[in-house]
Image (tube, rainbow, N blue to C red):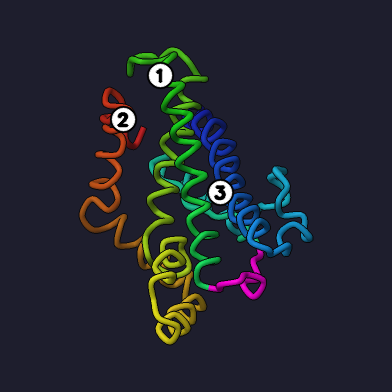
């Protein structure tokens, strides 16, 4: 139990920071495109308290503790966006959508660089809590990036797909957002219970960034 709580103490702050960076990036790009909604509501703040979703945080803790640290699922409050303020609804939402995964890619890249520079051997994780925390930054941001790029409404990948649809198809596509949580829950169920889920995609990415760490997926 003590080991599980230690994992939680390391993983929870890393995940919260990653989620906040993800959401603030959405809001910042929207702001640059002319939508001040997130800014006016204080959602460009780096303060995690401005972004936490109470139920999402509870689910995160329950899934982590219930799975003995093998998985974690939760969410932050989505940044409010008014696409009516964009010159192009579809293009604006696509750029806002890609901003979140890009933010996670940047965090993962910085963490990978730090690991390759200061902790080049897998065994380093056994001797340093800092090394484990940095690896968690890398691991969780790769997962967040890839998961959010899945083209299922309301994930960011669906916003990117929307930029390539004609107007009529796009209007039907965005209507699927109302069923978003239902889609996400089905997606998670499939990924967890059938096949290797995202693992087949994540492991090659691990090997690209950190060849010597690729066997540590699921640490």
Q: Categorize mark 3 by other alpha carbons within 10 Å: few (<14), some (14-19), many (20+).
A: many
Q: Nearer the viewer, mark 3 or mark 1?
A: 3
User: Which residue in the protein does label 1 denote?
Assistant: 125
Tell me what residue is drawn at x 47 percent, y 45 percent: 64
- The answer to which of marks 3 and 1 sits earlier in the sequence is 3
Residue 205, relative to residue 38: is it above or below? above
Find residue 184 and report its horizontal and vertical position in percent.
42, 65
Residue 182 lies in the magenta stretch = no
User: Which residue in the protein does label 2 denote?
Assistant: 216
- The answer to which of marks 3 and 2 sits earlier in the sequence is 3
User: Which residue in the protein does label 3 denote?
Assistant: 22
Residue 137, relative to residue 176: is it above or below? above
Residue 111, relative to residue 22: is it above or below? above
Label 3 to label 1: alpha-carbon separation: 26 Å
Find residue 27 and report its horizontal and vertical position in percent.
64, 56
Label 3 to label 2: alpha-carbon separation: 24 Å
Q: Is residue 204 left or right of residue 44?
A: left
Q: Categorize mark 2 by other alpha carbons within 10 Å: few (<14), some (14-19), many (20+).
A: few
Prevailing SS of the magenta stretch: loop
């Amino acid at each position: 139990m003590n080991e599980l709580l230690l994992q939680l103490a390391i993983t929870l702050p890393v995940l919260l920071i990653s989620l906040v960076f993800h959401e603030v990036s959405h809001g910042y790009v929207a702001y640059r495109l002319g939508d001040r909604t997130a800014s006016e509501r204080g959602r460009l703040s780096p303060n995690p308290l401005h972004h936490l979703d109470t139920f999402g945080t509870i689910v995160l803790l329950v899934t982590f503790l219930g799975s003995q640290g093998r998985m974690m699922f939760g969410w932050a409050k989505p940044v409010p966006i008014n696409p009516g303020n964009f010159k192009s609804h579809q293009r604006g939402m696509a750029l806002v959508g890609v901003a979140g995964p890009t933010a996670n890619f940047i965090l993962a890249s910085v963490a990978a660089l730090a690991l390759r520079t200061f902790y080049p051997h897998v065994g380093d994780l056994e001797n340093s809590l800092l090394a484990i925390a940095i690896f968690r930054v890398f691991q969780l941001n790769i997962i967040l990036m890839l998961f959010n790029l899945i083209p299922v409404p309301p994930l960011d990948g669906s916003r990117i797909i929307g930029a390539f649809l004609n107007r009529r198809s796009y209007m039907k596509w965005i209507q699927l957002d109302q069923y978003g949580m239902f889609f996400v829950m089905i997606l998670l169920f499939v990924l967890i219970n059938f096949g290797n889920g995202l693992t087949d995609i994540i492991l090659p990415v691990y090997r690209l960034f950190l060849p010597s760490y690729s066997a540590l997926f699921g640490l």
